[in-house]
Amino acid sequence: MAGRLTTHVLDTARGKPAAGVRIMLYRVSGNSHRKIAETVTNADGRTDAPMLTPLEAGSYELVFCAGEYLRRTGQAEGEVLFLDEITIRFGVPDTEAHYHVPLLISPFAYSTYRGS
């Protein structure tokens, strides 16, 4: 089975999935970033399809447009936010594995982990 990359976003301040979060995926090589995918989370805070399949070994970045979401839901306002675009850089050593990289957000904190 080919490996794949999935993600979802949970709004920990509101206790529910974060719908409508724009996410970009970049392939990283040295100082070079190449965008390879872009999507928006659905009502369940998930993407409708994997962000990437099949996988290639290497470094990647997921960029979550949290500021857009936080403004839209009334949790943040103003031109400058504490959290705006959240970037998670991670490596893919095993191209046959499933990499699930979720984001848990609130206006002043975030966390991530490798899920299943």
Image: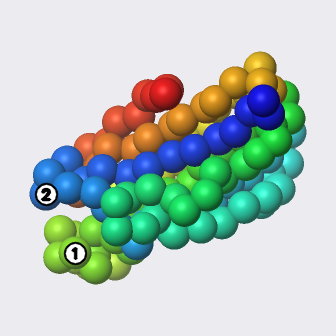
Picture quadrant of residue 78: bottom left
Picture quadrant of residue 96: top right
* Residue 20 visible in image: yes
Give the quadrant of the N terminus: top right
With 100 as the anchor, is 102 left or right in this view?
A: left
Residue 103 location, x and y as percent? Answer: 40, 44
Residue 52 location, x and y as percent? Answer: 73, 48
Q: What kind of residue is marked 2?
A: Arg
Up the image or down, 15 lies above or below 29; here it is: below
Query: Disc 2 on helix, strand or loop?
Result: loop
Observer-nearest residue: 108 or 106?
Answer: 106
Q: Residues within 10 Å of mark 2 (few under 14, many from 20)?
A: few
* Residue 84 visible in image: no
Query: Disc 1 on helix, strand or loop?
Result: loop
Residue 101 location, x and y as percent? Answer: 51, 37
Numbered tag placed on residue 73 in the rendering:
1
With 51 as the anchor, is 27 left or right in this view?
A: right
Tell which residue pokes out farthest to the left in this image: 14
Mark 2–mark 1 CB contact (< 8 Å): yes
Q: How many marks?
A: 2
Residue 87 location, x and y as percent? Answer: 54, 47
Residue at 34% across / 60% down in the picture? 44
Q: What kind of residue is marked 1?
A: Thr
Up the image or down, 19 lies above or below 100; here it is: below
Numbered tag placed on residue 14 in the rendering:
2
